[in-house]
Amino acid sequence: MIKYLTTALLVSLSSLLAAEESVLSYRGDAFSLEGGELLYTEYHELTTKDGRPVARETRYQTSDTEEFAQKRNQYGENPAAPDFNLNDTRYGYSEKVTYDNGKWRVSYSEPDESEKGTLGSPDYTPVIDAGFDEFVRSVWPKLLKDKTVRFSFAVPSRLEWVNFRLIPLQRKEGKLTVEMRLSSRLLSWLLEPVELTYDEKTQRLLTYRGLTNIRDKDGEGIKAEIRYTYPD
């Protein structure tokens, strides 16, 4: 009798733990900044548990629905700095960041070269790949008070952290728009700012405008406006 009760209890507990996980599926359509044609589409599946991100799977498709890249994020104690692995099968490009034994290990590979190493200590809060969204939510109160925040973003192709400022631009019609610029004002002209608009109520990203993590055939980062849509 006790054995059956124990088994029933374990089954109920397993069901409860499984119920705590949820998956959010949404998409992002990337349009060229000049001409507005559809370049590619991102399909995201974000798994959360108790409101915290656990994993994210992202598939990239051309406008002809041909899948050309895949990315996986695995979240740990710091949601802003997940492990990730991106593979673009069109051009043989890949990049990867993992946190192992107290160190961030980073690598990238393309047809003509590849390199790997470790990242040093960041100057500001470390942010990696899609962990940027989690970072934005963590500093949300400051952004609403019109305060600029700084962070260090991992750039695998350079094997280093790059420092940025996140600057609130405006709040309008229930949306918050922020701008991502290089932290150094003297060097900020080297990279055009990235503009992001969030829904104030859900804190979900609505649009992203600027340099993306997808490259063209010449190995240059694609600039686009990505418009995100979510289930009702």
Image: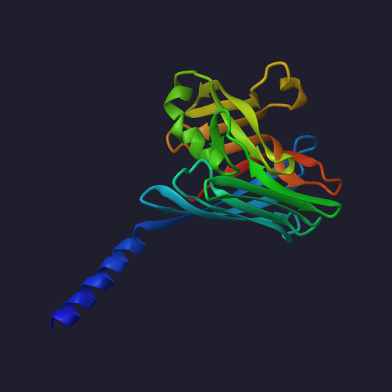
Instruction: State whether residue 204 appears in this view.
Output: no
Q: Residue at left 63%, top 28%?
A: 163
Q: Residue at left 51%, top 22%?
A: 171
The colour scheme used here is rainbow
- Give percent across and percent down for residue 197: 57, 32
Residue placed furthest toward the left? 1
- Give percent across and percent down for residue 145: 45, 19
Residue placed furthest toward the top? 186
Q: Is 65 or 188 nearer to us in this picture?
A: 188
Viewport quadrant of the N terminus = bottom left
Q: Residue at left 51%, top 23%?
A: 172
The image quadrant that residue 142 belongs to is top left
Figure check: 179 above or below 19? above
Q: Is 62 or 80 nearer to us in this picture?
A: 80
- Give percent across and percent down for residue 156: 69, 44
Figure check: 145 above or below 89? above
The image quadrant that residue 161 belongs to is top right
- Give percent across and percent down for residue 200: 46, 31
Q: Is 70 or 95 nearer to us in this picture?
A: 95
Figure check: 42 above or below 163? below
Q: Residue at left 50%, top 33%?
A: 136
